[in-house]
Image (tube, rainbow, N blue to C red):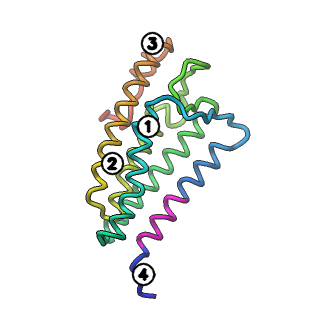
Amino acid sequence: MEGLVEYLPLLIYGALFAGLKISERYILSHPDRMIRKEWGDWTVYLTLIPMWLVLIGPVLEFIFLEHRPDVWEMVVGGLLFAAAGYLSIKGYQDLQYGFAKAIEIEDISIVVTGLYHVIRHPISLANILFLFACPLFLSAGPSWIPALVGVFGVILRISIEESFMAQHVPDYADYKKRTWALIPYIY
């Protein structure tokens, strides 16, 4: 029983990640959404690779470096997981038919309802929160490096996507004036 208690943070971490991914999978595979699921362009990897490193790194640090989180790290990390899950799931729901992993020209339209009424990239914000949640929840050290690389990747992807949208969507400049990229009143 003592060994199970020692690994409780790891079990909770796994449950949080599984809950997030199962919820996302449900939303993405819902039959009335018709979301495009292709892997997309090279910019997907700016966040995908650091996210996998950030997911696995804290687990390895927990097991091999014996990093053990304090309760406050687990609580704040858990809240970041929950916020990432909410923004991700709500963002996909609000997009309905508009989500694609690639920056592409076909069927471009702007979604201006739900979260997109206030912020232009709620799913990217969810990715950033996830990048912070993983190393924080398990009190990781070196895993913060790919987390920061991932944040820069998300911001670079947003910049590329916004340039693309400005060139191909006539109303995008007005939409950009009315909304925030990630965090209202900040960015």
Query: What residue is drawn where x is 50% and y is 51%?
Result: 85
Residue 70 visible somewhere in the drawing = no
Between the C-alphas of marks 1 and 2, the distance is 14 Å
Q: Quadrant of the C terminus?
A: top left
Q: Name which residue type carries label 4.
A: Val
Residue 7 visible somewhere in the drawing = yes
Q: Which span of residues is magenta-colored? A: 9-18
- Say which residue label 3 marks: 167
Task: Residue lying at the far bottom in this picture: please name it.
Answer: 1
In the rendered image, the vertical position of residue 104 relative to residue 49, given as above or below: above
Instruction: Say whether disc 4 or disc 2 marks the residue closer to the N-terminus.
Output: 4
Task: Residue lying at the far front in this picture: please name it.
Answer: 64
Q: Are marks 1 and 4 in contact (CB under 8 Å)?
A: no
Disc 1 versus disc 2: nearer the observer = 1
Label 2: element kind: helix
- Say which residue label 4 marks: 5
